[in-house]
Each structure stands twice: as C-alpha cells, then as structure tokens.
Amino acid sequence: MRKFAAPVLLFLLCAGFYWKLTLTNQYTFLDSLDLANLDLPRLQFQASAWRHSQLPLWDPNHWAGQPFLGQVTGAAYPANWLLGAFPFREGKLSVTVVHWYLVLIHFQAALFCYFLCRDWKRSQTASILGGLVFSLGGFLGNTEWPQILNGAVWLPLIFLFLFRALRGQRALFSAATSGALLGVTWLSGHHEVPIYATTAVAAIWIVALALATRRTAILQLGLAAALATALIAAVQILPAVEYAPLVKRWVNSENGPVSGNEAIPYAVHQEFSWSPAALPGIVTPRPPVHIDPFIGIVAFSLAMLGVYHGWRRFPQVRLLLLLATAGVLFAMAGNNFFHGIFYAALPVFGKARVPARALVLLSFAVAPLAAYGLDALRRGSSPWLARTIWTLTALSGLLYAAAAIGPPQGQAMLTAFTAILGAVLFAASRAKAISPQLAAGAVALLIVVEIGNVSGAEMASRIAPGRAGHLDRLFHHHDIASFLRAQPQPIRVEVANADIPYNFGDWHGIETLGGFAASATTNLFELERQKPRVQDLLGINYYVGRAPPRPDLERLTDGSSGLSIYRNPSALPRTWIVHTATRVAGYQDIRIRMDSPDFQPRTEALLLTAAPVLETCSTPEEARVTPSANPNRVRIDVKLACRGIVILSDTYFPGWRATVDGRPAAILQTFGALRGIVVEKGDHHIEYLYRPASAVAGISLTALGAVFVLWTRWRTRKMT
C-alpha cells in the first residue's frame, strides 16, 4: 500500500487546493466569456452524444450543421467521453462534475510529474513537490481551459519515456510510448500546446542525432517516436486537415476571419505575445499578460539551486534549463526574432496564435528543477545555498519596502513573507537545526501556500452581486428551450447574440443558425446568412430576442428572461422538392439571384456544377424529415410526382453519404451551401450519413498506433 501513498496524497492536496470547487458550490472557474459561451456547451454536446452511444462527428446545433471532430473540439480525447457517464441535472451536464473534472486534470498533471521525478531518482518528497509545482503553479495553475490543460498534462510522461529511450532503457518501446503520448496531446481539443510540445520534442531528437556516436540507432528510435505520434494523432489530425481549407476562422485579426489554411497575420501573434516587462511575474504576483506564469519565489529559488547542483551531473537538468529558456523566448514573440523564424519556416507553428502559451515549457521545466533543488537542500551546504538565503532575504525586504511605499498589496506582502520564511527554512536546513525531512516538508508546504496566493485565488464567485454572470445566463432560458422543443419538428432558430451570447444550440440541443464558435464553413459566409431571404432558405422558422430583427416575424410568447419567441412564416421547410435547376458561375451569382425578388428558391435550385435533367409536374408532392437522436444521420421520406431534386437545408460538407431506398446517391451542392439529391418519381426513403473518410482513416490509424506501441513492447521484451 505504501506505493499508493504518494498518489493519494497528491489527489488530496489537489482537491484541497481547489476547495472552492470541491467543498462548496459558491465558486466556479467557468464564469468567463469563452468557457461559459463556447467550451461548456461543447462539453454538453459531447456528453449528450456519448450518452446516446453516438460519435460526435457532426454538430447539427449551430451554423446549420458543422463538422465537430474537424474543429478540434476534444471529441477524440478519451477523458471527455467519461463525462457522458455522469448523471445530468435537468438534461444538462452538471457544473459540479465539470469542477471535479478540472481537479482530476490537475491531479493527473501532478501524478505524471511525480512519476517523472521519481524516474529521475528524486526523493519522494521532492517528487511530490515537483508534481505540485507543475500542476498548481505557473501555466497549469493559471489556465482554466480544460482542453488546453489536457494537452499540457502529458508533458512529464512524454519526457520520461523520451529520456528512457535516449539512455537505452527499453529504447524502442520507450521511444514509441513517448511519441504516442505526444500524439495524445493532439487529441486534447486545442492545438497550441501540442505544437509547442512537438517542436520541443523534435528539437531534442535532432540534437540527440547530431551528438550521437551511433546515429543509425538514434534515427531509428526517432522515426519510431514520430510514427507513433502521427498514428495516434491521426484521428484528430486528418479531420482537421480536411476541415481547414473549407472554413473561415476568427483570429482577432483587424481584417476579419481568415481561411483555415491561411497564415494568421503576424500582428496577431505580436498582440498575444508575452512581455519582457512581465518577467518578474514568474516570482512575484503581477497583472498577467495573456498568461500568468507565477510559480513563486521559493520554488524558483529551489529550481535555480537545482540547476547549480545538477548542471554537471545530470543532462536532463541542462535540457530543462534550455527548455525553460526556449519557452520564454517563444512566448515573447514580439521582442525577438526566434519565434518569427519558426513562424516563417513552419506553417503549422503559425497556427498557434497565442505565443504566450509557449510558457507551458517554462512551467514544465521548472517543476523537476525544483525537485532537484529540494534534494540539494536536503544534502547539505553549498555556496549557492548561502547565496540563495541572502537573495531571498533581500527580495523579501524589497517587496516589503515596495508594499509599504505604494498602495497596500496583499499578494505582494504574502510573497515577501514566504520569501523570508523560505530563507529561514533554508538557513535552518543548512545549519542542521532541523531534520532534512522536516525541512523538505516545510518548504514544500510553504511553496504550495505561496502558489495558492495566485493560482485559484481569483476563482469567480457564483453568489457575489457583482459577478460577471456568464455562467448564470446558461440557466436563464430553459422555458424558451422547452417551448421550442414542443413545436413541430424540425426547427431551426436564430438567437440575438446580444441577449444570448452563449452557444444556445449545443447547450439546449436545438438546431440554430450561428452560435459562439471559433470557425465556420466558408460556404455559409459566401451565402451571406444574415440576409432575410437567406435565412428563409436555411429554414430559420423561429427567432429569440428582445425585439424582432424584421417586421414580418410573428410574436408567439415571452420568456421569463424578458426575451420573446417569434415565428418566421416565410421560412422554407427543412426539406423541399424543386423541378428546375440552374447552373451559375459562382457565389456572386447566387447572391445576386437571392437578392432578386423575382427569384423563388422554393421552385428553383442554383448549382455550381452542371444541372441535372429534371421533369416538370403539377401533382402535389411531399417531403418530410424524420426526427433522429443521431447527430450524424438525417432521414427523409418523400413522394415525388416526377423526377426532381430533394433539397435539405443543412450545410454541405465532404463526408456526407446519401442513399435513396438503400442505393447510393450523389449529393449536389445546392445554393453553394446546402445539400440536394436527384430522386425519381414515387415514394422513397432518403438517408444521409456523415461518415467522412478522414475520420474513418483517422480512427483506423490511431488503432494501428496503439497496436504499434504494443508491438514495440513485445519486440523489446523479445530482444532482451
């Protein structure tokens, strides 16, 4: 049981550190613009899909239907799948469950860094400290997005197995495992941490190859690691690669959204760079510049002590210092040319539009270095230990003086207090006045207290009168959602963004046009979705807001939130039949025709390709969508008097397959953004199934990656 003592202690410390989330219901980390409006509704959609045993490949609930996996949403990340297993509250993912999910992510980070430190022969106390510094301080401690954290937590294990491979410890299996874990970071739901991690790992393999005497062996190991990364990440990478050229992405550019495969303007990178003026924020509380890297003065002092004592003896110490330096340089993209070179040379590097997030490398590197420093403190005296004591004492005095001269600053005063306590503990340990075990435990506790001075300190209150209220808004419109669900289906809704800023569709499971998103398919942009006739074409039959955006909408009822529900009587049905099709040259012609009052999309389809031969008839016809709980499937029953096109006002995108009475049918891109199928006379059953080749191939390759790692384990055992 002793081997479980450290993991249990780490779990208890992480749960206790986040007591505001685990022991009360008064606080939340979700009350921010992006988390409440985008990320929580995304998790809700994923959890709902998994509860119904469905793969969340397609999201029908926003922007008239969009690829979900291709947007890099975390749908391929295994931990997210578990959210669907927990009970819902009033049909929604429990906020308490999401709170515990965050705590478990931090526990995972602490545990993995603990494993790394133990593998590098650090003492148990030092390893626990390293895990806590990585998990609770710096980048992880001050980042709230679960999808970003899920990419960062794997860094310790990636480097654990990477160093095992380089030192020849079950080299092939270790290299493949390191690569596979790097691939897992690409499944996390955000691309920036994986980009920086992959860049760092690739650089290490290149340096190892350059310095090796047996270069063939290192090359083989590096290729095995790269293959494992590519295979494991394929389930996310392939759909993302398919998605990118067909969408526009909001990147905070002055020029508006950019194409998914277009370079993000470097001015955006400069805007989201870390500042050299923020460097003191590593050790003292300061207003963050995009990312707060605070780890505290005591932990940083231990890390520097670890560098001094381990520089000659341990190659990993030298690597960690270089990694920390690289993280700082890349984060300060606006103040050095290193980032710009990578931006220009590696197109994928430029996709990480927030260079400040490269500080994840600094936060990771400092944690094991602090563990080395704590072990050095326990071993005895050194010139650097004495200098560290005097430095802490001097910094404490400076911080006290600054706080005394300026306005009162509680966080700075606590940092000064921990600095002087750290100096006292270091001096007592150096003088053998207390036992090494007591000194190590006291220093570790002091570091956690200092980190808690910043990390989690600004957790949003759920009951304070002046709270932002982003999370509260998600629970204000249940009556509106219930009313809409009670209407004849299918429906599609447009909501006023000023009144409902969050992703209403994903949160309530109601199909909408628009929604809080990072990107959307280009064809909807080209169609100019905000125009009334286009909204009619897209089947927007309901509108929710304080006032109608157009005079022809009919007011149905009012919600308790002060919003009203309006019906659009001119909206086209979700599916309809036309017997006339015209080919046009491009989207400009489509827009011109849609603007013309003489054009009737109810009877004529516009195509960007050759128009099929159709028949004209006047007998009444029927087309009806059958409701389905599967987001990846649409069923339509039709009755045609003669040959025509059955149009479905859902977004056209590669990967959809169609059958008519079980026989494959070609999908036409009608109106540049919708779907259509040519159907003969008679009664027919049409079925659309979203099964993109990118996802099928990605799942297969990821499974192959797991098999490859297992094979390397078998191969390594056989060779030894």
Image: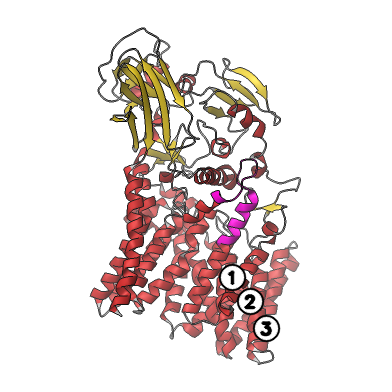
Q: Would residue 173 appear left or right of 51 to someone viewing this image?
A: left
User: What residue does disc 1 label?
Assistant: 132
Q: Which quadrant holds residue 260?
A: top left
SS at badge 1:
helix
Q: Would residue 705 appear left or right of 87 to someone viewing this image?
A: left
Q: Would residue 367 appear left or right of 594 to someone viewing this image?
A: right
Q: In the rendered structure, which disc, 1 or 3, sits on the residue that comes first in sequence?
A: 1
- Asked if the residue under mark 1 is in contact with the one under mark 2, i.e. CB atoms within 8 Å, the reply is yes
Q: Is residue 91 magenta?
A: yes
Q: Which quadrant holds residue 677?
A: top left
Q: Which quadrant holds residue 431?
A: bottom right
Q: Which residue lies furthest to the left in this view?
A: 216
Q: Give coordinates of residue 401: x percent, y percent.
A: 72, 71
The C terminus - image quarter: bottom left
Residue at figure coordinates x 55%, y 38% from the top left: 503
Residue bounds of the magenta highlight:
84-105
User: What residue does disc 2 label?
Assistant: 444
Residue 220 or 702: which is nearer the viewer?
702
Q: Give coordinates of residue 257: x percent, y percent.
A: 44, 39
**In the image, what residue type sits under mark 2?**
Ala
Q: Residues within 10 Å of mark 1 (few under 14, many from 20)?
A: many
**In the image, what residue type sits under mark 3?**
Leu
User: What residue does disc 3 label?
Assistant: 425
Q: Give coordinates of residue 308: x percent, y percent.
A: 50, 83
Residue at figure coordinates x 42%, y 56% from the top left: 186
Q: Distance between the residues labelled 1 and 3?
A: 19 Å
